[in-house]
Image: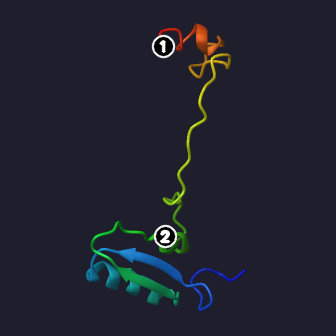
Amino acid sequence: MAKLGTDSKPAVVRVQSQERANEILRICDEHNWKVVIGVEPDKGEDVYDVYKLLGYKVENTKTITKDKEIGRNDSCSCGSGKKYKKCCGKNL
């Protein structure tokens, strides 16, 4: 698998202004990383790949996770040790 920031797998980012694009390009040039920058003013910024290269711990904003629902007979999440239906779920 190719390493991120190389010719075969450049970092891909989306920014909203040319000034921000120049800033990202300067950072990538300092580290000799290859990058593809898209300037799209009407969309949100996505600089995940550059943050990953810089070593920041960031969550992938493209992944959406859903919390597990508590069943009536599961232990209550408040830590009481009671079943959910006899504790916090009692009033639902």
Q: Amino acid at mark 2?
A: Tyr
Q: Give the position of the N terminus as an image quadrant.
A: bottom right
The answer for how far apart the CA atoms under marks 1 and 2 are is: 43 Å
The quarter of the picture where residue 14 lies is bottom left
Q: Which residue is mark 2?
A: 51
Residue 63, percent across and down? 54, 56
Q: Are marks 1 and 2 in contact (CB under 8 Å)?
A: no
State the residue in front, 16 or 32.
Answer: 16
Q: Nearer the viewer, residue 92 or 47?
A: 92
Give the side of residue 71 with respect to residue 90, left or right: right
* Residue 89, placed above or below residue 45: above
- State the residue in front, 25 or 72: 72
Residue drawn at 65 percent across, 81 percent down: 3
Q: Earlier in the sequence, mark 1 or mark 2?
A: 2
Q: Is residue 3 left or right of residue 14?
A: right
**Residue designated by label 1:** 92
